[in-house]
Amino acid sequence: MRLDRLFATLVALFACPCAFAAAAEEPSYQQHENVVYGEADGVGLVMDVFTPRGEANGLGVIDVISGAWHSDRGKIRDHTRAQVFEILCARGYTVFAIRPGSITKFSAREMVANLNGGIRWVKNHADTYKIDPGRLGLMGASAGGHLACLAAVTAIPNQPADSDHPELIGTNVRAVAAFFPPTDFLDFGGRAVDARSDDGFGQVIRRLAFPQGLSNQSEAEVAEALKQISPAHLASPQSPPFLLIHGDADPVVPLQQSQRMLAALTEAGVSAELVVKPGGGHPWLTMDEEVRVLCDWFDRQLEPK
């Protein structure tokens, strides 16, 4: 697929209600909508919180709600159809579905800053939700996976919790899982990204990486800016364990993007796994199967050490 079709295809796929399996009729959770966790540039930042109806396991998972770098409520419906909340809450997890803002207002780094504010909010309210702030999972799909990966590899280390100064709370998490995330904007499926292009993908890249516009920057400066929003270029030994899930027939985000992230994490000495879904697109009908794999993985990663 040509890069200039990426943005339109992402929007179309994530808007399609047939893209996911139907959620259970009797949910395993209670949904608390539009919980305010912050404000940015006069815009309120909100999340939905999904609490288990049954026995809780004392663990939380932050789900980054973003598709095509838009975080409207329709993306929460997509994750509901994929049974993300049903499966995790049935296992006892409390899920914080954070909406970090959309590309129409925020750059990639600004969205990550918003997400970091949400992570801090969750840690600061751990007692309220009876979860362990030191054993949080982080996940996302597509653009949400990109933001989750980027937040994880650029996380600020844990500091003592201080309710009067929440900005001092670290943003690191115990483990990260991502479905088909973009991770390298210097090499997207074997192609160089032209941030100056007027095609759809070029426009998206400029919004993500150059909120003040792209004019007199040198090629080296452009490459550095793209690197700073590419998780695969920022992996370090301090990165948490990762689980990547990607279809080998993805027409939007190449499998190479998860392979590239896996290689970067492995090179940094970080525990990382890649699950490849045969025939999987972007997304696929049986996403709930891989959500269960993700849930099992979080069970292992978030257990006490």
Image (spheres, grey):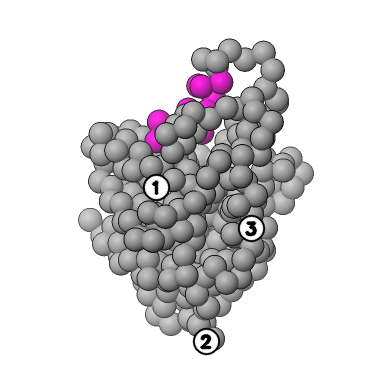
Q: Which residue is mark 1?
A: 255
Give me the C-alpha separation between circle 2 and circle 1: 35 Å
Tag 3–tag 2 contact (CB < 8 Å): no
Q: Residue at the spot x=34%, y=61% of the render? A: 278
The image position of residue 195, as x and y in percent, is 60, 27
- Towards the viewer: 167 or 33: 33
Q: Residues within 10 Å of mark 3 (few under 14, many from 20)?
A: few
Inspect the magenta stretch and tell me whether residue 223 lies in it.
yes
Taking the image as shown, residue 220 lies to the left or right of residue 47, namely: left
The magenta region covers 222-233
Q: 253 above or below 263?
A: below
Please tell me whether residue 122 is drawn above or below residue 232 in the rendered image.
below
Q: Residue at (52%, 62%) from the top-left corner?
A: 96
The residue lying toward the viewer, choosing from 245 and 172, is 245
Residue 217 makes an appearance in the image: yes
Q: Position of residue 249 (x, y in %)?
A: 42, 55
- The amino acid type found where label 3 is placed reads Ala
Q: Is most of the magenta stretch helix, strand or loop?
A: helix
Q: Residue furthest front?
A: 1
Q: CA distance from mark 3 to mark 2?
A: 28 Å
Element under disc 2: loop
Precedes in sequence: disc 3 or disc 1: 3
For badge 2, the amino acid type reads Glu
Q: Which residue is mark 2?
A: 26
- Report helix, strand or loop for mark 1: helix
Q: Which residue is mark 3?
A: 12
